[in-house]
Amino acid sequence: MNHNNTLSLSIMSGKGGVGKTNIVLNLGYALHAMNIRSLLMDCDLGLANLDVLLGISPDRNLHDLLQTGVDAEDVLVSIEDGFDMLPATSGVPELVEMDEDLQDILFKKLINIAGEYEFLMLDLGAGISHTVLSLAALTQLRVVVVTPEPTSLTDSYAMIKVLATQHDIRDFLVLVNQAVSAKEANQTFDRLNAACMNFLNIELRNLGFVHQDRTLVESVRRQTPLMKFAPQATASKDIVGIAKKLIRYREDNRERIGGRPILKDFPSE
């Protein structure tokens, strides 16, 4: 059980290309700068990206973690002191749609170390595969990353709908990425929230937005997280603001978080 310590979040998106992994990585750096211990887990199990954004080649990954005799500590990569990552791998089909035995192994090994951190963030793959939905159902909170593009809104609504109808999940935070202005970000959130209210009777929570920022493109090319490459960039400041909101949520809900498991059991088929 989580004794007033770890807040687990799934960071997810209905479609690829919305900047979700960059958000996860830079949120981790923002939390680290505020002396908050965080563990990132790359759960894009068929197309790993966190290690690429960091410009590293881990010796082990989640595929190794599923092998007998390998513990989570053996796979951990230290990004900074108190800021760690569990890397995934690419091109391993059995990880994309994990069976229940693999899910159980992963869950048991992850839960052994999760309590050492104040935040556990799962960077999920895009879309609505069974593995993505199962992982999303594990955590205490879900953050849906969207952009103002109509396809992003449509796919995010579909993902929320499936999680609500198949897994009875009704609490979602929304982060609007790549917005040119606060007005565009608010309009994007309002459109998605209106659809969820009207058709699913779900009210979303607005976590905030990150401006479209050319500096981010350069940071990706240099394989250096934006928070290190350009901490004074507009998008960096936005991410710091979102990190502060998450810290506030954790503080305000200590009793509620403390009475729940860090991760729930994997849902069955």
Image (tube, helix red, strand yellow):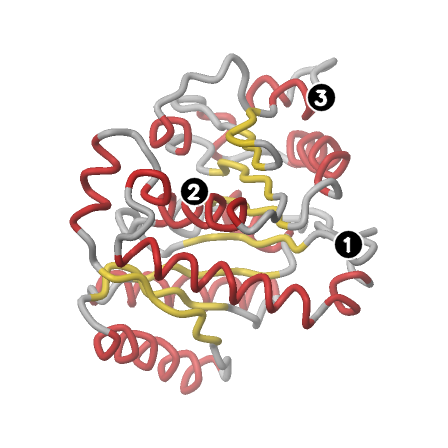
Q: Which label sits on residue 71?
A: 3
Q: Which label sits on residue 25?
A: 2
Mark 1 residue crowding within 10 angstroms, few (<14) / some (14–19) / many (20+): some
Residue drawn where x is 42% and y is 16% of the image: 57
Residue ranking furthest to the front: 232
Instruction: Answer yes or no: is residue 134 visible.
Output: no
Secondary structure found at label 1: loop
Residue 99 percent coordinates (x, y): 61, 34
Query: What is the three-letter code of the residue carrying label 1?
Result: Pro
Residue 137 percent coordinates (x, y): 61, 55
Q: Is residue 4 above or below residue 28?
A: below
Q: Quadrant of residue 125?
A: top left
**For marks 1 and 2 on the same chain, the one whose residue lies earlier in the sequence:** 2
CA distance separating discs 3 and 2: 23 Å
Secondary structure found at label 3: loop
Query: What is the three-letter code of the residue carrying label 2?
Result: Leu
**Which residue is label 1 attached to?**
261
Residue 220 percent coordinates (x, y): 25, 36
Secondary structure found at label 2: helix
Q: Is residue 183 left or right of residue 167?
A: left
Residue 5 percent coordinates (x, y): 75, 53
Of residues 137 and 23, which is closer to you in this image? 23
Q: Is residue 161 left or right of residue 146?
A: right
Q: Is residue 129 above or below residue 163?
A: above
